[in-house]
Amino acid sequence: MHAPSTPVVVLPGEFPVFEAFGDRAVFHLTGGQTGGRYTLFSSETAPGCGPPPHWHDREDEWFLVLEGKADFFKDGAWSEVPAGTAVFAPRGSVHAFRNAGDTPLKQIIHTSPSGFEVFFERCAEAFHREGGPDMGRITKIAAEHGIHFA
């Protein structure tokens, strides 16, 4: 992938949107737009939902909690954090988040390098199959993208 040599502007309504793991993810900038450098997305997570503890072989990931109550998993334990909290999960670290409140949890999330958007799109397709997702298939998709569940 070639890095852009001029600014990239993506207007509202042009963002891909995918739903999986109880999350609605809006991908504001993807690898195709950043030359593979990073992915920027906003996430809205339903109460009680979020991904299971996992780690990434390829991506660093960072979060900014905009609204709601979040629990983050780090060092083997869950901790509640308020809106305004920033979290960095370096590649290889076991982490997760979940909505600890009764209203939607809204976050801005970045991954670097890019590629997470491809994983999430593939999972969204699996989650929307008749009969729901086959978690064995989700685990296989994750492994193909260097993501592993703890």
Image: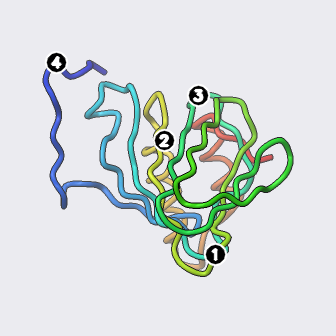
What secondary structure is found at the residue carrying circle 1? Answer: loop
For mark 2, what is the residue? 116
Mark 1 or 3, nearer chain start = 3
Q: Residue 66 in the image: x percent, y percent?
A: 47, 59
- Mark 2 or mark 3: which comes first in sequence? 3
Disc 1 from disc 3: Cα separation: 30 Å
Q: Pick whichever, 45 or 122, lies toward us.
A: 45
Closer mark to the observer between disc 4 and disc 3: 4
The type of colouring in the image is: rainbow
Comes first in the chain, label 4 or label 1:
4
Which dot marks residue 5? Answer: 4
Label 2 and label 1: CA atoms lie apart by 26 Å
The residue identified by callout 1 is 101
The image shows residue 78 at horizontal and vertical percentages of 79, 56
* Circle nearer the viewer, 4 or 1: 1
- Going by the image, does 105 lie left or right of 32? right
Element carrying mark 2: helix
Residue 58: numbered disc: 3
